[in-house]
Image (tube, rainbow, N blue to C red):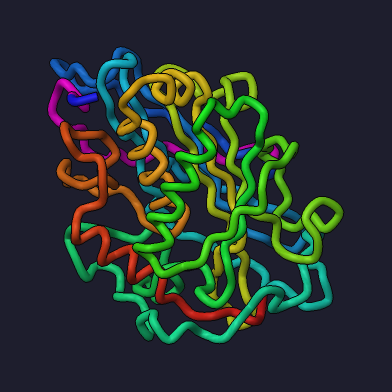
């Protein structure tokens, strides 16, 4: 596919968030109508993302739009909006195994000595106009990251995976590992289905460690917002460590089955691969940017199919987070 959009790139737009009656269910994100004269979207895009915070008494989910979209099957656009509202502090994860109603594994499972090859610490947020972090710590400068001292495990639901899609995703993951210095481990396929109530610790299914990132190819029946031009949904999950820092420990990445099946069946996999890289960028902690020449722009641009050098610097920075034997 050589053309990635017909009109000018749309800027990020803030999401309108409504407080849900049931705090375990995330409210939808509603998008304003496209500007008159633009041809990127035949319909108003709408999507939902989730970020999990653990509190005493239950799980609170807040909305984060982190998607890639492709319009009408013959052009492409990433679309979404960043979450820029204050994030309340959660409850530290205790080694006793529970925090409120949320179970957690023994602290430090899978943690190893810090690799000598990674930088000492991440660059502070705002260091570059070419990238920004998805979330920051209470200092508003240090990014929320995965522990570089343990592998990020992931599984793929085999159901509805197009021919070659799992291998394509593994290839994108290998690229992300190279760019961040983080270690990713593929634990194989799973029968687990994605859910808005997914638990980050499932010892009966995955053993005494945080549940691996779940990757699934879904329809709108499973994700009601996987409609129109929506083709991706990324949900990194974080917990509050004993140190008080937020740490990513699990998550979900969902792709539209019809989109992936269609493009995996063609000779050109650029649309699928760039979508996978974009969503993996969110998983490790990158937010959207307005620059249309960058892969993390919420709307795709002609020929932008890989991370720019500046984005690669940001990914390397996200691989330099603190180690966390306390989660």
The N terminus sits in image quarter: top left
Verify whether residue 100 appears in magenta. no
Outermost residue, right side:
204
* Quarter occupied by residue 228: top left
The main secondary structure of the magenta stretch is: loop
Residue 200: x and y in percent read: 70, 55
Q: Quadrant of residue 292?
A: top left
Comparing 177 with 275, the one in front is: 177
**Residue drawn at (45%, 34%) of the image:** 232
Looking at the image, is 72 positioned above or below residue 288?
Answer: above
Report if residue 10 lies within the magenta region.
yes
Q: Quadrant of residue 107?
A: bottom right
Q: Quadrant of the C terminus?
A: bottom right
Kindly identify the residue that appears in the image at 19 percent across and 65 percent down. 128
Does 307 sit left or right of 154 as displayed?
Answer: left
Is residue 301 shown left or right of residue 92?
A: left
Highlighted magenta segment, given as a residue range? 3-23
> What is the x, y in percent for residue 293?
15, 44
Task: State whether residue 100 appears in this view.
Answer: no
State the image coordinates of residue 175 (x, y, percent, origin top left): 38, 55
Q: Judge from the rendering whether residue 76 lies leftward or rightward of residue 130; answer left or right.
A: right
Q: Is residue 54 above or below residue 47?
A: below
**In the figure, 297 relative to 28: above or below?**
below
Q: Nearer the viewer, residue 186 or 222?
A: 186
Residue 193 in view of the camera: yes
Q: Position of residue 92 (x, y in %)?
A: 67, 74
When the figure is inspected, residue 219 is found, relative to residue 154, above or below; the finding is: above
């Amino acid at each position: 596919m050589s053309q990635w959009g017909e009109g000018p790139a749309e800027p990020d737009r803030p999401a309108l968030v409504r407080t849900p009656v049931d705090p375990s269910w995330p409210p939808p994100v509603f998008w304003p109508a496209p500007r008159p004269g633009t041809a990127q979207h035949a319909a108003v895009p709408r999507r939902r993302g989730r970020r999990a915070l653990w509190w005493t008494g239950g799980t609170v989910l807040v909305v984060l739009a982190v998607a890639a979209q492709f319009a009408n099957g013959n052009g492409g656009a990433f679309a979404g909006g960043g979450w820029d509202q204050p994030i309340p502090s959660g409850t530290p994860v205790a080694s006793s195994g529970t925090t409120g109603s949320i179970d957690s594994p023994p602290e430090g499972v899978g943690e190893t000595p810090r690799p000598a090859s990674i930088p000492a610490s991440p660059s502070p947020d705002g260091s570059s106009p070419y990238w920004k972090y998805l979330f920051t710590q209470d200092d508003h400068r240090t990014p929320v990251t995965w522990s570089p001292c343990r592998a990020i495990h992931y599984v793929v639901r085999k159901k509805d995976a197009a021919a070659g899609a799992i291998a394509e995703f593994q290839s994108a993951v290998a690229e992300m590992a190279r760019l961040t210095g983080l270690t990713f481990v593929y634990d194989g396929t799973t029968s687990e289905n994605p859910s808005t109530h997914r638990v980050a610790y499932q010892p009966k299914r995955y053993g005494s460690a945080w549940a691996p990132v779940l990757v699934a190819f879904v329809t709108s029946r499973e994700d009601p917002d996987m409609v129109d031009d929506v083709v991706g949904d990324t949900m990194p999950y974080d917990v509050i460590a004993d140190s008080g820092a937020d740490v990513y420990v699990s998550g979900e990445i969902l792709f539209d089955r019809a989109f992936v099946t269609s493009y995996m069946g063609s000779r050109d996999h650029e649309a699928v691969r760039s979508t996978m890289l974009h969503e993996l960028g969110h998983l490790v902690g990158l937010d959207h940017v307005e620059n249309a020449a960058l892969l993390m722009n919420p709307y795709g641009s002609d020929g932008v199919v890989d991370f720019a050098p500046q984005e690669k610097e940001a990914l390397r920075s996200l691989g330099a987070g603190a180690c966390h034997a306390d989660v």
